[in-house]
Amino acid sequence: MGIYYTGKKIWITGATSGIGEALALEFAKLNTVLILSGRRQEELDRVALLCKQLGSVAYTIPFDLSDAAEIEKAANNVLADYKRIDILVNNGGISQRSLVIDTPIEIDRKVMEIDFFSGVILTKKVLPEMVKAGFGHIIVISSITGVFGFPLRSAYAAAKHAMHGFYETLWAELHEKGINVTIVCPGRVNTNVSLNAITETGAAHAIMDHDINKGISPQKCATIIIKAVQKRKKIVYIAGKEMLMVYFKRYIPWIFYKLVSKVKPS
């Protein structure tokens, strides 16, 4: 499995926890050069040290995904230092737990800026050198909520749906120039994403989703992603029984809508 990744420069956002951290640690075993990003320098240093212990070269560059100017500056610095990124992992993001009717537009915009536009900015920054080199791989961490809407996640679902449209188009335009795209749609993964989700006030939700502990581990999720990327899969679903909703939406939509109508937001 390591041949595809050997020597590749891989930039991961949201690398301080959850799927991002797990991906960093798995990539570190594959003789890669890692650039790790997140908001917290101390946590980035912790993950970078673990990556180095696993045999990788690891650098850190902190920035805030909600700040377009910071993103631009970080991207310029990365390209100045490393010339080219081989694999970009747009993983960083934030979830949401609030009803549409209660959510002010500022919260919708914040979620879209973090979950959608930040990745678009980074992608557009690294693409020219990828095209010039004739190789690049963009890994996009979406969600099964990028395939269907679900209560309390309106802005989050919107951002994930937007990802699919943007990156599918990118692949259609640039695959002949060596640009690969893999959109990853996890279902229930045992992370703190629901704790850190924002409510209509912008405060942390601070409540763990029901049965999240029954989800797969970030490590298992990362292993599946790495295998799928090597196979150049365009889209990969990583889910348990919640995957049924994807099938219902696609093939038997009336069942999907009946089930969603019975979900009681709380």
Image (tube, rainbow, N blue to C red):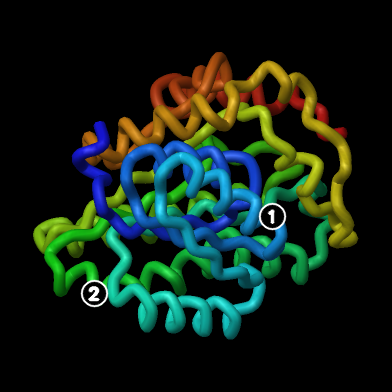
- Residue at point 82% right, 32% down? 208
Is 103 situated above or below 2?
Answer: below
Q: What label sits on residue 43 in the rendered view? A: 1
Measured from the top left, where is residue 218 in percent x and y?
57, 31
Closest to the observer: 257 or 187? 187
Q: Mark 1 or mark 2: which comes first in sequence?
A: 1
Amino acid at the residue labelled 2: Glu
Name the residue: 58% across, 85% down.
69
Disc nearest the viewer among 1 and 2: 1
- The amino acid sitting under disc 1 is Glu
Where 252 falls versus 4 (above or below)? above
Residue underneath mark 2: 129
Q: Which element is circle 1 on?
A: helix
- Which of the two residues, 246 or 73, is positioned nearer the viewer here? 73
**Foreground of the two, 72 or 202:** 72
Crowding at mark 1 (Cα within 10 Å: few <14, some 14-19, many 20+)? some
Identify which residue is drawn at 86% across, 46% down: 205
Can residue 214 be seen in this snapshot?
Answer: yes
Q: Residue 140, how many percent across, how many down?
A: 43, 50
Residue beneath the point at 48% across and 56% down = 12
Label tally: 2
In the picture, the quarter occupied by the C terminus is top right
Q: CA distance from mark 1 to mark 2?
A: 29 Å
Give percent across and percent down for residue 104: 81, 65
